[in-house]
Image: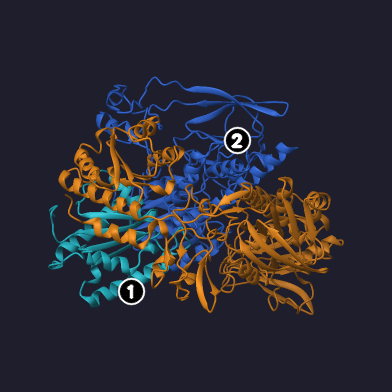
Amino acid sequence: MSADSNNVKILVFACRWCGLFGADAAGRQRIELPVSFRVIPVECAGYVEPDLVIRAFASGVTGVAVLGCHVGGCRFNDANHPALKRLELLKTLLDTTGIGGNRLLLGFGTTHEWHQYVETILGFYRELEGLPSMGAWVPVKQ
Amino acid sequence: MGGGISGISAALDLAAAGQHVHLVDNGFDLGGIVARLDKYYPTDHCAFCTLWAEIRRCKENPSIFVHTLARVESLEKNHHVFQAVILKLAPVIDPELCIFCGRCKDACPRGAARPIWEHAYPPFYIIDRDRCGDCRSCADVCPTKAIDFDREEARFQVPVDEVIWSAGFSEVSLEPLKEYGWGTHPDIMTSLEFEAWKAEAGENRGTILRHSNKAVPRNIAFIQCAGARDLKFLPHCSAVCCMHALKQAQWVRRRNPAIDCVILYTDLRTVGRDYYGYAIRAIEGKGVRAVRGRPSLIYPLPGSDGIAVKFEDTLTQTREIWKFDMVILNGNLQPTIPALPRGYAVPTLATEGRVTRLFESYGHIMTPAHVTESAVHASSAALRSIMEGKK
Amino acid sequence: MPKVTVFLCDCFGEIGKVIDLESIRKRFNADPAVDGVTITESLCLASDVERALSAIHDRGIGKVLIGACSPYGRMEFVRLGLVKKGAELRHVRTVDLREGCAWIHRKDPEGAFRKAASQLDMELALLQNMQDSKDITVRLQQETLVIGAGPAGLSAACGLARLGFRVHLVERGSAPGGLLNIISQAYPGGESGSEKIGLRLEEVSRNHHISFYGKTRVVSVKGQAGDFKVTLAGPEGKTGLRVGAIVLATGARILFPQGLHGYGKLKNVITQMEMERQFSTGKPACRTAVFIQCVGARNIDRPYCSTICCPLSLKNAMRIIDEIPGAKAYVLHRDIMTPGSILEAYYRKALEKGVQFIRFDAARPPGVLGEGQVGEVQVFDAISGVTRTIETDLVVLSTPLIADPESAALARMLEIPVDKYGFFAEVYPNHPVETLNDGIFICGTARWPVSSDQAIAQGEAAAMKAASFLGKKMVSALAMSRMPDQKVGHASVNSDACTGCGNCMAVCPYGACRLQRMGNRSVSRVIKIRCKACGNCVSVCPNGAMQMPELNDRAVCQMIRRAFREVR
């Protein structure tokens, strides 16, 4: 897993509750992680809509992770439940468009401890590295 | 007096009503037992997310004075005012200055410098005095000069109009009750010990393992009413243990469906909102076995690494001895009545050791209670103390 | 567009030893959107904010970007420190360069630098494109409404009145008291039902702050927290109220065991409430009483425990033994639900008095037999494994409390959820009296079956919470976040673009998005007080009419674009 792996550019949308507690704890444990991922913190994973995911892919990102609280634990009264369903549906659609549903990782309630966050990120990396390159993606210019 | 869930709720309510509050807790940080639990019922999530916001509010509120690593040394009543003497122990590392860089931990040769428990926010380092060899290398490397071994404890007196007792509960050692076998085998644990052992944030990262040899257990027994409802020991019912055992058992099954979990109970007390539904989901949904029978003897099996539990199965009216890889004891909780060496005597019920005056007490200290009841008592006590003050 | 001031914290080298902060500074100083970059050794110690600010021009603080440690640590102190100096909390954005970068990429300083620069660049885009939600300040009505005058409602009313609030106490029956009017003796203290609430009843009639409306119902509630417009319908017609908080204490009903254990067919098979009535008017005439627990409860239809039936049976069983010389009492149960110290002691007291306990299993319930009137009860004693026959002349059936039939309609009116059994539900277990709708509180058996002591405590808790809420007198919508911080912003809709599809209304957990008529169209409108800025409505809006100004589409798209842009 080299730092310059062209294949892997992950954009993480993480809710600033369960989504990021694990990230914070992983940092405190000084776990070494690959560098090519960026984090956008949001209030609720439900803010993430298919449009944003597609734009990410269009900008050259090769994997998108959406991290949120587990269903039943959302502090906005289960707002993440329909969000999860929407994103699951998106996964299926991504398969049909050729991008591939496995480029969208949904981690709802799976990253609130450091080891869970680390396993999620590293696991996603391994998976993405194994996938064929996204080809000559030209990031959308303004 | 006590900064767990009850104390925090009451302090916030009082502050919102314009009162000034001294919130005293003897731990390194607020949160009490609930903040340290791996999961809590009925939500089955970690508790710290919900408590964290409250703890932050307490610390930021200008009307609430938080005193951690502190205890009330004495309480004297003079007419209508209490004079409380608060003793603040001196933490070697000042949490206000600790930036969590960890250089003290790297510098310490004996592993005495360690971070506070996992879910405290903001986190800081503490020195474990038992391990510390007093070499002071940590103090040399601390960039903010947060470490001071000569820091003195502070004692100060505050006049207060009302006192709210919210020190919660603590475990009673089951060592005197030889029939439970606590202390005779590393796999015989109390439920709070097991909670830390199985915690996702703990050393096993949530995997269920035996304490003796870190192997995966085949079965686990949860023994209810251990030490409780026992006229020779603790006559009361600790209220929270039935739900606690159900929670632990179904989490064990969630993490490893191959582990057989048996709860040996006398009465399965599931009184709160949907608690009985929770029990049904654990028993029918997750396959937790609830067997009615109170064990008479628990002992390590000679010649084997298992533990024997001898009990009467009241469903079949037969005497049984079942072998388990782990035994979790539930029930040995007592209220934490702060010991005041001089001055105002804590009003307690002679037989039960409970605080009597209802408006001055709540949460587990008044009667063993779940989180919801403790929060209700807290707000109720806050209201009553304000009303008392207005008289 | 106002420029952004950037602070980079070295954290005593923790960040600086991995990330080349000087290069970061150079890169951002060259950015036209930035008004100066300051690198400090630390930002979170007491005098740091002061010192850091002195390094910038004396222009007042506009938007600030901080690159330092984790937002869950000491960063909050920094943000609050800046707010004290005049910054807007929403305009202070932070990037985690420590736990989120330096500490996890120690082996790749080059990569860590690129990541730090990107993340800062992304937040910069956010700050540049961020817009401000319009805030509103609401005056909180200082009057309150308590619906239901049972023990919970009475306690809530008295609590609020003592704290200085005007209370409108509404009761659909003709007199206050609720279930306690039927209880002849409460447990564990032994006072009568009316003695238990006597002081409070007196207070209700005495205290000028409390207005009692008997035989009155609530027919409509409009508005939200701090300003509810309520219509009552009573014997004198309709009354309109404007209140800031509502406490629901509408109680519950007892289930009638129709068709169970001979009730209605055999004489002297009665309910607990009927037993209470018999005690109020004298003594029940019996030589033996058999109490059967869990009748119609903890079964498929009602899989819950009703909390009060075990202690109630213990109390009545003990009363039978005390008041009728030579009488016997049996309690047939599946579990004795007396948790805690007070109730467990009560259980022991019953044992000492000679109440006999027989345990049965759900699969083999007892049979009540007789001709015309009850003669005997047969029960398979699960502990001894023997079927026992008890000759008896009185059978008392313990049935559960069930949700009041009017609860569902009230819940809809107040826009709060009920649980699957019909009782009003709270949101978090550690906030047991607070509901999804700010300003509406629940207590007593309307919330869940509880003893009168607990109902009284819950009523007080609800009063305390309502008082805390209203005590501020004025509140800005942004401040009503349930979090220690202000909300990030509010959702806001562009009415011209809105197509009235209603997706937002369907998805909003707080009922903050509403469709309303505008001319001949339906457009969405956001009720700022209710919105909690979760962003779900933004996500389901088909054409971007719904936006979160602080995290609008333009801002987040810029962030995505800059995530992996080449760093010069």
Q: Nearer the viewer, residue A121 or B184?
A: A121
Pointer 2: residues within 10 angstroms few (<14), some, or many (20+)? some
| x and y percentages locating residue B247 in the rendered image | 46, 57
Q: Which chain is cyan?
A: A
Please state which amino acid type lies under the numbered disc 2: His
Image position of C153 (left or right of B17) = right
The residue singled out by tag 1 in the image is A89
Q: Is there a contact, CB below 8 Å, between mark 2 and mark 1? A: no
Q: Residue furthest right?
A: C282
Q: Is residue C45 above or below residue C552?
A: above
Q: Quadrant of residue A68?
A: bottom left
| x and y percentages locating residue C472 in the rendered image | 61, 47
Circle 2: element type:
loop
Please state which amino acid type lies under the numbered disc 1: Leu
The residue singled out by tag 2 in the image is B20
Q: Colour of chain C?
A: orange
Q: Chain of mark 2?
A: B
Q: Chain of mark 1?
A: A
Image position of B286 (left or right of B356) = left
Pointer 1: residues within 10 angstroms few (<14), some, or many (20+)? few
Q: Quadrant of residue C411?
A: bottom right
Q: Which mark is residue B340?
A: none
On whether disc 2 and disc 1 are found on a single subunit, the reply is no
Q: Please give the name of the residue rendered at 25% of the width and 36% of the height, measured from the top-left corner.
A: C14
| x and y percentages locating residue B387 in the rendered image | 71, 41
| x and y percentages locating residue C464 in the rendered image | 64, 48
Q: Colour of chain B?
A: blue
Q: Please give the name of the residue rendered at 37% of the width and 67% of the height, measured from the top-left corner.
A: A84
Circle 1: element type:
helix
Task: Say whether residue B22 is visible.
Answer: yes
Q: Is residue B90 above or below residue A18?
A: above
